[in-house]
Image (cartoon, rainbow, N blue to C red):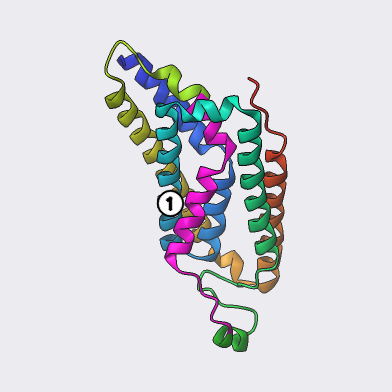
């Protein structure tokens, strides 16, 4: 891969990564409600999911997935359904801030529903691995930057690393900015509206995935 091609790939990847999507919305929600540690763990899960999709791309399996309308539809249904589930869960959430407090202190002491960091990691990974947006990128666009006149594996590793770094930094930044705005969430009424907005966005984003097509 020559320098010009690499620079073009870097620009394309950067603007692709920072564009709004399920992972960014999840980072904003986690930053506002759960703090930076959860954002980082979820972001780590997300980039592992991206690495999985990238590996599928280089192995050719991603192209098969993209070419099969049935398989691609199955991935869409799973990914869309999970986003809608996240939206419904947020709409029914009773958290009032990044310390995982609830509207009732008695409920907080008795429910014991605090999530583990592993669950946030899995959530970030699943959102990435079932999101048609990166599947389309790695299957249709990613291979276009590979120079077959040179060893493919080193190019693949470099391009994947660049994409993962951009993704991690992007999600961490969005989460950090949301965490900095946590003062807004000290008000119970604001939190209710935040849950409604974020939940509605997740549901809307999940619904929109059903309309993604493989045609260019």
Q: In this rendering, is residue 123 above or below 157?
A: below
Q: In this rendering, is residue 197 above or below 100?
A: above
Quadrant of res 68:
top right
Question: How far across and down, in percent of the image, does residue 128 sit?
Answer: 51, 44
Question: How far across and down, in percent of the image, does residue 36 sit?
Answer: 43, 60
Residue 167 lies in the magenta-colored region:
no
Instruction: Tell me what residue is drawn at x 41 percent, y 57 percent.
Output: 41
On screen, residue 13 versus residue 80, left or right, reads left
Quarter holding the C terminus is top right
Residue 116 lies in the magenta-colored region:
yes
Quarter holding the N terminus is top left
Mark 1 nearby-residue class (10 Å; few <14, some 14–19, many ≥20)? many
Q: What is the count of numbered marks?
A: 1
Which residue occupies the foreground of this view, 159 or 166?
159
Instruction: Tell me what residue is drawn at x 71 percent, y 60 percent.
Output: 196
Question: How far across and down, in percent of the image, does residue 114 sit?
Answer: 51, 74
Tell me the element at label 1. Answer: helix
Highlighted magenta segment, given as a residue range: 111-139
Instruction: Tell me what residue is drawn at x 61 percent, y 78 percent.
Output: 102
Question: How far across and down, in percent of the image, does residue 127 sit?
Answer: 54, 48
Q: Residue furthest top?
A: 149
Q: Main secondary structure of the magenta part?
A: helix
Which residue occupies the foreground of this view, 129 or 100?
129
Q: In this rendering, is residue 107 above or below 177?
A: below
Identify the residue under disc 1. Answer: 45
């Amino acid at each position: 891969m020559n320098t010009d091609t690499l620079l073009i790939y870097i620009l394309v990847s950067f603007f692709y990564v920072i564009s709004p999507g399920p992972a960014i919305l999840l980072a904003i929600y986690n930053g506002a409600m759960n703090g930076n540690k959860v954002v980082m763990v979820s972001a780590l899960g997300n980039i592992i999911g991206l690495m999985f999709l990238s590996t599928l791309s280089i192995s050719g399996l991603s192209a098969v997935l993209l070419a099969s309308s049935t398989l691609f539809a199955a991935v869409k249904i799973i990914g869309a359904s999970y986003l809608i589930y996240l939206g419904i869960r947020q709409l029914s959430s009773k958290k009032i801030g990044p310390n995982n407090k609830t509207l009732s202190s008695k409920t907080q002491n008795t429910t014991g529903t605090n999530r583990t960091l592993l669950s946030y990691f899995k959530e970030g990974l699943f959102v990435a691995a079932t999101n048609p947006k990166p599947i389309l990128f790695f299957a249709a666009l990613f291979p276009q930057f590979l120079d077959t006149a040179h060893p493919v594996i080193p190019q693949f590793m470099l391009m994947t690393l660049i994409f993962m770094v951009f993704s991690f930094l992007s999600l961490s930044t969005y989460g950090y900015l949301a965490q900095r705005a946590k003062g807004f969430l000290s008000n119970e009424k604001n939190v209710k509206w935040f849950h409604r907005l974020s939940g509605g966005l997740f549901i809307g984003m999940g619904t929109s995935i059903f309309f993604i097509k493989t045609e260019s």
